[in-house]
Image: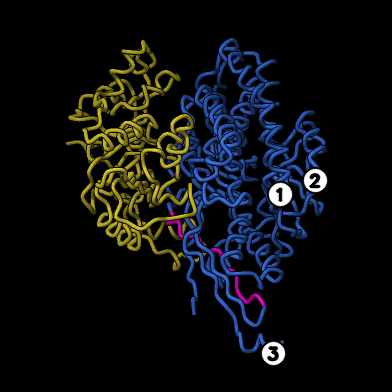
């Protein structure tokens, strides 16, 4: 169109993305109505975890990797513990296994409630923050804060503190809870289960932008339960592998135009999606009964391919986490020993677990002194990075005629749908941006 | 400040995990009351709208690891009346300060396929190494109630009341049997500032120093005792080089251990 020739293009620049964890920016350049360039700019300085883990004792690793992320430290503890147990050739018993799931449920609750209510819901309702939202939606905000608080209290009880808990270790736990003490959480968890179901209804009714994309969903998969700590990795495009095959199937690519590491399918170079939307789509039938019923009744057809509806998947998982936590405290038996005796040996092991934001892969090699020789960590956000840019490329052409402030808000909402945790900069590079 | 004006609070982040600024959002019962008392002017994790400085109280999370961050910190300092560091990274350099004993170029080559793109300083340093700091709150992570006490004290124009004794004292208070005496475990409790409530010994493990050195610590007798108890020198070096390992007391004690014996 002629008017496009006289209107060569525009640049949208968001220097600081807000309501995400960590710091990043967004750069979009359009020309004659076409999207020429989309760049997500992560400017978290590298902290070199994989380098300084070398030479540390394996039992120090879960405490150190927790510090990669203040929002999901348990995920980093769980992936490193499972990978190191694989290297040592040990498998803790069923009581320890359930206690780990309970710890993970507590983190999912805390993280999902934070994301749904404090970071993301304000986007759909037209507020710049949860504080602004609280004035007109006090009931919802109070519900969100209490949902989050119960997750934090459970983390605090199981791990000593909600951020960087101290109880989990390779081989089990330094200390396990008493059955009667855990039972004290029953009333709060029951309230939380009801409030989480209300959350599903609340977020499913939000006004969602009309946008879908063609995703490959990737998640951990277990034959009998909703994925958390084990066992295989599957995708909607037919991948079904052991964690040991992860690095053959998925590749962290160094992209020349952006100088950032993006995970892609090694064979096709294509992007993929991890996180709540991928998990619910791939594991709907394994959700706990009430969570599954809430998912099926909320008016969204699964599998869902609208990324903005990730907030609904997150609410479904919030329900699942409350429901499973309740089930675990009902059946919990104190293990005879809180942790296995470990015989040190040289070896290599890897594991993938489900952080609140998606698949978290760790691999370690240790020597016969139990010291780490090499470490590799692939956080969920680096796996979703390419997918976020692909979504922006798909979304933008349909909305370019709208006012710039509206486009910017929509792009930020999309990125927040992913809940990118850009503090986990084990691997992110500083980008060079051509602002010309 | 003019009557009726709420003081402006800002939160800035450098190299860190976000866990300490999260403490603000984890004040679930106090958050809405807090925002009645202070205006959150700059807090990227919580709100989209940002207000320009100057700020009455600025919380700084994270350590300084790049020249860009150092420049940004200087601007933040100029814009801030009270600057408070929150957490082990901002106060002691954090776990990423382990690079300070190593070659950061080798670190970059070990982690990144194209290390030439990595622009990082050779050291991770606390905020106080670069600008004047009005108050330091330690912890990995900070204790959210200590953070609330600091904010309350600043709003009331008084000094924050925070305990300065060691973790060791808190173990006695809560009746935890000493893990070093009873189990022979290496523990930094006698040197470490309280704040966690003596968590790790209550979980059958030694303290690993999250809250950094206490006032006037005396590391030599503890190190000598642990060596005598059978701890190996490299193990103690690693214990001292944790989340606050670059803090002066822990740093000098670990370096002393590495020196050949006379």
| Residue A85 visible in the current orientation | no
Q: Residues within 10 Å of mark 3 (few under 14, many from 20)?
A: few
**Magenta-colored span:** A34-46
Q: Are marks 1 and 2 in contact (CB under 8 Å)?
A: yes
Residue B219, given in percent of the width and then of the height, sits at 22, 29
Q: Earlier in the sequence, mark 1 or mark 2?
A: 2
> Can residue B249 be seen in the rendering of this structure?
yes
Report in which chain the residue with disc 2 lies. A
Q: Nearer the viewer, residue B134 or A431?
A: B134
Q: Locate residue A127 relative to residue B220 in the image: left or right.
A: right
Q: Residue at x 72, y 49 (%)?
A: A218
Chain identity of mark 1? A
- The residue that label 1 is drawn on is A309
Give the colour scheme of this rendering.
Answer: by chain
Taking A145 as reference, is A116 above or below it? below
**Colour chain A appears in:** blue
Does label 3 or label 1 sit earlier along the sequence? 3
Crowding at mark 1 (Cα within 10 Å: few <14, some 14-19, many 20+): many
Q: Return the residue at label 2.
A: A300
- Element type at mark 3: helix
Q: Secondary structure at mark 2?
A: loop
Chain coloured yellow in the rendered structure: B
Residues at marks 2 and 3 on the same chain: yes
Kindly identify which residue carries mark 3: A2
């Amino acid at each position: 169109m002629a008017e496009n020739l006289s209107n060569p293009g525009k640049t949208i620049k968001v220097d600081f993305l807000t309501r995400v964890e960590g710091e990043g920016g967004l750069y979009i350049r359009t020309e004659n109505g076409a999207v020429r360039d989309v760049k997500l700019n992560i400017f978290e300085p590298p902290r070199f975890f994989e380098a300084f883990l070398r030479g540390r004792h394996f039992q120090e690793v879960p405490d150190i990797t927790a510090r990669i992320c203040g929002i999901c430290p348990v995920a980093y503890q769980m992936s490193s513990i499972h990978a190191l147990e694989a290297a040592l050739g040990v498998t803790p018993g069923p009581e320890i296994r359930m206690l780990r799931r309970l710890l993970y449920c507590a983190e999912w609750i805390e993280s999902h409630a934070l994301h749904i209510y404090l970071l993301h819901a304000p986007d759909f309702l037209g507020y710049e923050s949860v504080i602004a939202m609280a004035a007109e939606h006090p009931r919802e905000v109070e519900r969100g804060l209490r949902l989050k608080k119960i997750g934090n209290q459970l983390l605090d009880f199981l791990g000593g503190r909600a951020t960087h808990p101290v109880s989990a270790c390779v081989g089990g736990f330094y200390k396990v809870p008493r059955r009667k003490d855990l039972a004290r959480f029953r009333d709060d968890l029951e309230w939380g289960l009801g409030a989480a179901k209300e959350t599903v209804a609340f977020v499913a009714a939000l006004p969602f932008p009309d946008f879908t994309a063609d995703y490959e969903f990737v998640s951990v998969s277990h034959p009998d339960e909703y994925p958390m700590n084990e066992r295989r990795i599957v995708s909607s495009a037919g991948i079904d592998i052991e964690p040991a095959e992860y690095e053959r199937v998925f590749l962290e690519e160094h992209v020349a135009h952006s100088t950032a590491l993006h995970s892609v399918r090694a064979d096709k170079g294509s992007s993929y999606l991890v996180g709540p939307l991928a998990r619910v789509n791939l594991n709907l039938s394994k959700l706990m009964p009430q969570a599954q019923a809430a998912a099926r009744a909320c008016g969204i057809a699964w599998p869902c391919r609208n990324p903005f509806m990730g907030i609904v998947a997150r609410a479904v998982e919030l329900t699942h986490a409350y429901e499973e936590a309740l089930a675990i405290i009902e059946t919990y038996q104190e293990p005879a020993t809180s942790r296995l005796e470990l015989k040190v040996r040289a070896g290599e092991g890897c594991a993938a677990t489900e952080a609140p934001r998606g698949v978290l892969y760790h691999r370690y090699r240790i020597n016969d002194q139990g010291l780490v020789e090499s470490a590799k960590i692939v956080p969920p956000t680096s796996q979703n990075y390419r997918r976020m840019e692909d979504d922006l490329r798909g979304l933008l052409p349909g909305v370019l005629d709208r006012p710039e402030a509206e486009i910017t808000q929509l792009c930020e909402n999309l990125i927040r749908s992913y809940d990118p945790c850009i503090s986990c900069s084990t691997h992110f590079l500083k980008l060079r941006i051509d602002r010309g | 400040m003019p009557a009726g004006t709420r003081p402006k609070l800002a939160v800035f982040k450098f190299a860190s995990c976000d866990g300490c600024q999260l403490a603000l959002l984890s004040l679930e019962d106090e958050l809405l009351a807090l925002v009645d008392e202070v205006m959150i002017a700059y807090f990227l994790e919580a709100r989209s709208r940002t207000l320009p400085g100057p700020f009455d109280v600025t919380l700084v999370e994270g350590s300084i690891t790049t020249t860009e961050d150092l420049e940004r910190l200087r601007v933040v300092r100029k814009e801030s009346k009270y600057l408070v560091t929150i957490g082990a990274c901002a106060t002691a350099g954090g776990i990423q300060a382990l690079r300070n004993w190593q070659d950061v170029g080798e670190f970059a080559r070990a982690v990144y396929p194209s290390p030439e793109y990595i622009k990082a300083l050779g050291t991770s340093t606390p905020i106080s190494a670069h600008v004047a700091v009005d108050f330091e709150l330690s912890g990995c992570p900070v204790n959210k109630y200590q953070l609330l006490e600091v904010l309350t004290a600043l709003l009331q124009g008084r000094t924050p009341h925070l305990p300065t004794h060691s973790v060791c004292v808190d173990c006695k208070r809560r009746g935890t049997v000493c893990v070093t005496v009873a189990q022979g475990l290496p523990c930094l409790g006698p040197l470490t500032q309280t704040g966690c409530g003596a968590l790790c010994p209550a979980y059958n493990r030694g303290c690993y120093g999250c809250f950094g050195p206490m006032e006037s610590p005396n590391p030599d007798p503890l190190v000598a005792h642990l060596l005598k108890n059978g701890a190996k020198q490299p193990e103690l070096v690693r214990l001292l080089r944790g989340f606050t390992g670059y803090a002066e007391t822990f740093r000098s004690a670990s370096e002393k251990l590495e020196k050949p014996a006379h």
